[in-house]
Amino acid sequence: MRTRNLILSICGAAAIFFAGAAIGANRFSKPSSVVHVITVRFKAEATAEQKDAVVKGIDKMAAEIPGIKSVWTKTLKVQGQNYSNAFVMEFESQKAFEAYADHAAHKEWEKAYLQIRDQSTTHDITN
């Protein structure tokens, strides 16, 4: 009887432990979207107005290009000497991301951006 109670207690404790672990497990997804991350160092002579126009231009561009799901333009922190801004765009698919490069709205945005960009890094990520 004692052995039976001990076994039942151990099984009960194990069930409670595993139920708690399952409930407390972090849930995450691995979407197939493409995330396009750009960090920028602007030219020293770039004005605040020019920089602001480039950042606002990202929203305008995103509204015109099919397949852009989300944009992030408020920079909190950027690493790298004299880098000041980071932009992120999420595309619904790799096909949408590839079409973005040649889209007229992107080409128009680049006219303002490339005039004041000193250097940038780009990272494109998907699953």
Image (cartoon, rainbow, N blue to C red):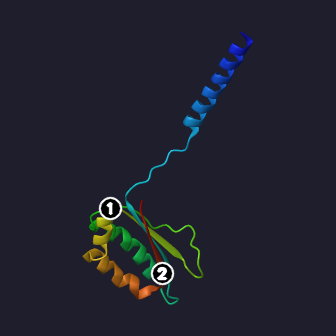
Which mark is in front, 1 or 2?
1
- Residue furthest right in the image: 2
Query: Residue, x 48% and y 84% (percent of image)?
Result: 119
- Residue plotted at (37% across, 71% down): 58
- Which amino acid lies under the numbered mark 2 shown in the image of this protein? Ser
Q: Residue at x 39, y 72 (%)?
A: 56
- The amino acid type found where label 1 is placed reads Ser
Is mark 1 in CB contact (under 8 Å) with mark 2?
no
Residue furthest out toward the bottom: 45
- Vertical placement of 69 versus 86: above or below? above
| Number of other residues with Cα within 10 Å of mark 1, as a class: few under 14, some 14 to 19, many 20 or more | some
Picture coordinates of residue 71, whole percent (x, y): 40, 64
- For the N terminus, the quadrant is top right
Q: Residue 57 in the image: x percent, y percent?
A: 36, 73
Q: Which mark is residue 93?
A: 1
98 w.r.t. 93: above or below: below
Residue 105: image location, x then y, percent: 28, 75
| Residue at the spot of label 2 | 120
Image position of 49 (left or right of 111): right
Asked which quadrant contains residue 97, the reply is: bottom left
Q: For the residue carrying disc 2, how many other residues have a C-alpha within 10 Å: few (<14), some (14-19), or many (20+)?
A: few
Counting from the top left corner in percent of width and height, residue 120 is at 48, 81
Q: Secondary structure at mark 1?
A: loop
Q: Camera-side residue: 86 or 74?
A: 86
Q: 114 or 52: nearer the eye? A: 114
- Which image quadrant for residue 11? top right
